[in-house]
Amino acid sequence: MSEQQTAEATPGTPQPAAVDPRLLVREKGFSGYFGEFARRIRGGELGSLPVIIGLIVIAVVFQLKNSSFLSADSLANIGVYTSGLGIMAVGIVFVLLLGEIDLSVGSVAGVGAAVWAVLSVTHGVNDWLAVLIAVAAGAVIGVLHGFFFAKIGVPAFVVTLAGFLGWSGLQIWLMGKEGSINTPSGSLVENLTGYYFEDKAAAYGLALIAVLGYAGSLLLEGRRRRTAALPYRPFSEILLRTGVVAVIAFAVAYVLNEPSGARGLPLALVLFLAVLVIADFVVRRTGYGRQIFAVGGNAEAARRAGINVNRVRITVFAISGMLAAFGGLFIASLSGGATKNLGSGNTLMNVIAAAVIGGTSLFGGRGKIWSALLGMLVIQSIQQGLNLLGMASEIQYMITGAVLLAAVVIDSLSRRTQKTAGRT
């Protein structure tokens, strides 16, 4: 019998403290990391992997079909057209984390644009003040939705469906008989999607800030997890991740600064990334963000843990309404003005599809804010590629629908695999 077996067989012999195997696997460096990665994949924890692979496939296919797909002009268009709907998708991610849905974002976007246009253009209110009032109007609408859902107990689906109809009527009423108000030249809203930073330092500077910020967040997270004796990423993995992000960020900056036909860094993309960073910080780094996940995972358990579930629900719908109104201003900027039809059509479906395709679960309690960016990049890349190939819009709808279905299927299979592996 070995010494270890003798020690185990002797009563009263002190045993060594159990060590989390995930800590050991991290200590092995890259081999341990890839082993951990394989374990997570087998357990159904796919994260953003499917959508990242999808983006690579989309880029390769369309670039082979049309060499202009990854050009400066094409990437700038993808960034600009992604921004407005992407900001709205961030709000939908918040709602989906609760396990709920908001069907009113399209009409709320229309109301936000109508409020701005009537105040700024028709009544001559200061442009900045009109924008703030429009965004605040979206937040108030969201609070109303959250109140009826959280306090009265009306299902979110019904509340926001009623809102979709009601706010569409308000939008038409605000726009009046003419039905459209053009965006003045040089106005704040026009510049949302029409302004580009032509200085090359802007694009490279933003890329540098993104890389340093990403590396800093990884290092800070690693230090906190080491202090708490939790699994953490080895420094070699942090270097690898930072290197990949740096290559992508500076490659995009280089393309946007191309001498031939490049317009520079779009302001719309900068604002979208700012919304993403702020929202991601709120969700991942604050107590409020943890409360959102708790309520989405199990509302009753969250209530018993002392979380004000009603407050979380109302504020989440307020965030969704606020970002919907803000996104509506981007749509108005792209379309040249506010109209009674702004936010209709496939706006709602694209926004929800972006959040789901990006990896946010429809079942609540699981997802990331950056899902909005990844999902919108998939949708807009498909649309941009098909436009370059001269494909009809109905083909775009069918392909986007198929991608959405695939995302939901992957999410469902992932949850089933995690349940089988005991990870839910």
Image (tube, rainbow, N blue to C red):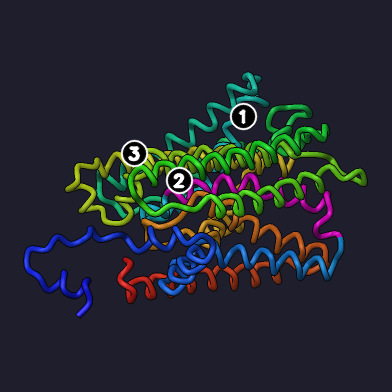
Q: Nearer the viewer, residue 10 or 404?
A: 10
Q: Position of residue 311 (x, y in %)?
A: 29, 39
Q: Nearer the viewer, residue 32 or 304?
A: 32
The dot on residue 222 is 2
Label 2 – label 3 distance at C-alpha: 19 Å
- In primary-sequence order, the first of circles 3 and 1 is 1
> What range is drawn magenta here?
68-94
All told, the count of numbered labels is 3
The three-letter code of the residue at mark 2 reads Gly
Q: Chief secondary structure of the magenta span?
A: helix
Q: Is residue 187 above or below residue 126?
A: below
Q: Nearer the viewer, residue 295 or 206?
A: 206
- Assign a secondary structure to mark 2: helix
Asked if residue 156 can be seen in this view, the reply is yes
Q: Position of residue 98 (x, y in %)?
A: 36, 52
Give me the residue at 70% from left, 64% from top.
382
Kindly identify which residue carries mark 3: 287
